[in-house]
Amino acid sequence: MNLPDYNQINVSKYRDKVEIIKQVAAQIEKDFYQFGFEVQFSGNPHNAYDELFSQIIEHVAYMLSQDYHRLVLLLYQIDLSEKEILKNEIKYPNADKHQLLSELIIQRELKKVLIRNYFKENPDKL
């Protein structure tokens, strides 16, 4: 299988792609809602990253301090591996954990959307 390389994803590359932004926001909203957290996207693509990040970081900070088990379940649902988290903790040792996790969540949700779209456009690659 010859997938595009989405391992080192650059979120800023997709900041002008309105349809991708909407899909990522919808995926984030869905995943967080399953665990009782509301994330809302206004639909404005120009501040989408900041808007989503500020809500995600608030929920992640809460779960880190008050409900770690739910955070683990959410990360599992999002498919953010412990290996990926540890790799980034080593790479960014001074980053606050809630900020790092929030960034990784957005990156993973973007990756899921890009992979889903890739297979929609290339069904023969399945």
Image: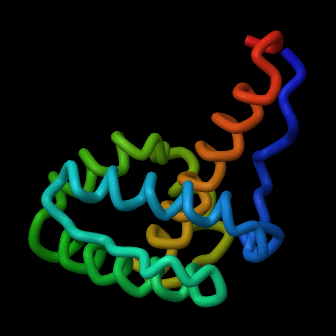
x then y, percent, for residue 125: 81, 14
44 vs 119, nearest the viewer? 44
Which residue is at 63% across, 76% downward? 92
- Give coordinates of residue 53: x percent, y percent: 47, 80
User: In the picture shown, does residue 27 fall above or below 119?
Assistant: below
For residue 73, above or below residue 17:
above
Residue 3: x and y in percent read: 84, 28
Residue at (65, 48) in percent of width and height: 111
Q: Is residue 31 left or right of residue 52?
A: left
Q: Is residue 48 above or below residue 37?
A: below
Tell me if I can see residue 117 in this picture.
yes
- Judge whether 38 appears above or below 105 on screen: below
Q: Is residue 53 left or right of residue 72?
A: right
| Left or right: where 75 falls relative to 45 | left
Given residues 10 and 67, the one toward you in this image is 10
Q: Quadrant of residue 33?
A: bottom left
